[in-house]
Image (cartoon, rainbow, N blue to C red):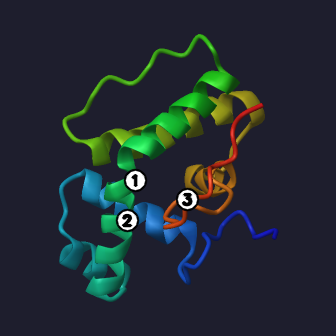
Amino acid sequence: MLIPEDTLLRRRDGVEVIGAALMAKARGAGHRTIAAELGRRPSTVRGWLRRFGVMAVELREHFTRWTHALEPGHDPCSPGGSEFFDAVEAVGVLGVVAVRRFGPRPPWSLASVVTGGGLLCNTSSPFPQPV
């Protein structure tokens, strides 16, 4: 199944909105504050944050592999204090590397593409791997 690159599987909100929530959490904001800023229900935002948190280590590793595939000489990220923060940072680093290689592109849209829309997916399906 093909999905638009600004969409995540089983999520009504666009990936840029969800990405903004993830970045706010990485900066230390709580789910209620984030929900109010984005105009979303707290339970919805809490679900996004929990799911990303559960998958944070796997996501960091996945985005790091993609970064290395696009730019093998890129320095690895240094730990930032939490698995959640490190995973969000890995998305950003891949975004920077991809812009250098391919030109401008929204980083959360790229995150959707390299996870096959499964950034917050709760299935055991593997993410697409770099070739």
Read off the residue under disc 1. Answer: 55
Q: Which residue lies most toward the right here?
A: 2
- Contact between marks 1 and 2 (CB within 8 A): the answer is yes
Real-space Cα separation, disc 1 to disc 3, in angstroms = 11 Å
Read off the residue under disc 2. Answer: 51
In primary-sequence order, the first of circles 1 and 3 is 1
- Where residue 91 sits: x, y (%)? 49, 43
Q: Is residue 12 left or right of residue 21?
A: right
Read off the residue under disc 3. Answer: 124
Question: Residue 63, labelled with which disc?
Answer: none
- Where residue 93 sits: x, y (%)? 50, 34
Quadrant housing the N terminus: bottom right
* Image quadrant assignment for residue 57: top left
In the displayed structure, would residue 69 be above or below residue 32? above
Q: Is residue 52 left or right of residue 1?
A: left
- Where residue 16 sits: x, y (%)? 53, 65
- Mark 3 Cα within 10 Å, few/some/many (few <14, many 20+)? few
